[in-house]
Amino acid sequence: MTQMIFVNLPVKDLEVSKAFFTKLGYSVNAQFTDENASSIVISDTIFVMLLKESFFQTFTKRTIADTATTVESLTCLSAESRDAVDELVDTALASGGSPAQETMDHGFMYGRSFLDPDGHHWEVVWMDPSAIQS
């Protein structure tokens, strides 16, 4: 069985968050979406579970991070090219996201980042396949 990842994120406004991720080109899996949560399909093996903060809180006894002042994680997605990095991040910024860090350009590796409407930090990175040695 192929291993999958489900990134669970607390969100303030489920509809705003769903709209943001669909503007990035991702789809909603209606089977796992209701008034408390929405499953966003990033790829065949990567899913983002957007959970209303009150619903998210039922899964933990810990305090939800205030993303206006703290970072709870950095979620990084790979891209097929430098242009694909720019396209996704530019779309995120035009769709309600905000800049997170300066562009990283090491020649063989290129990345940009954004904060989604709830302040979750996303990185998008391309790495030259010839620079990766087995």
Image (tube, rainbow, N blue to C red):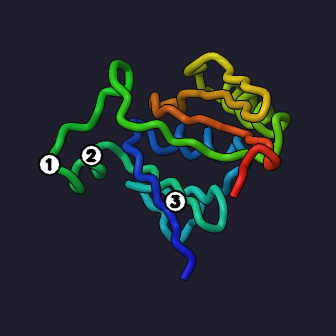
Look at the numbered disc 3 and give the secondary structure of its residue.
strand
- Residue 105 placement, left or right of 63: right
Q: Residue furthest bottom?
A: 1
Toward the viewer: 71 or 132?
Answer: 132
- Please state, as top left, top right, bottom left or bottom right, where the C terminus lies in the image: bottom right
x and y percent of residue 1 in the render?
A: 54, 83
Q: Residue at x 42, y 56 (%)?
A: 37
**Circle on res. 39:** 3
Toward the viewer: 59 or 84?
Answer: 84
- Residue 70 placement, left or right of 22: left
Earlier sequence position, callout 2 versus callout 1: 2
Q: Nearer the viewer, mark 3 or mark 1?
A: 1
| Residue type for callout 2 | Ser
x and y percent of residue 84 in the render?
A: 81, 40
Contact check, label 3 and label 1, Cβ < 8 Å = no
Look at the numbered disc 1 and give the secondary structure of its residue.
loop
Residue receiving disc 1: 61
**Circle on res. 54:** 2
Q: CA distance from mark 2 to mark 1?
A: 12 Å
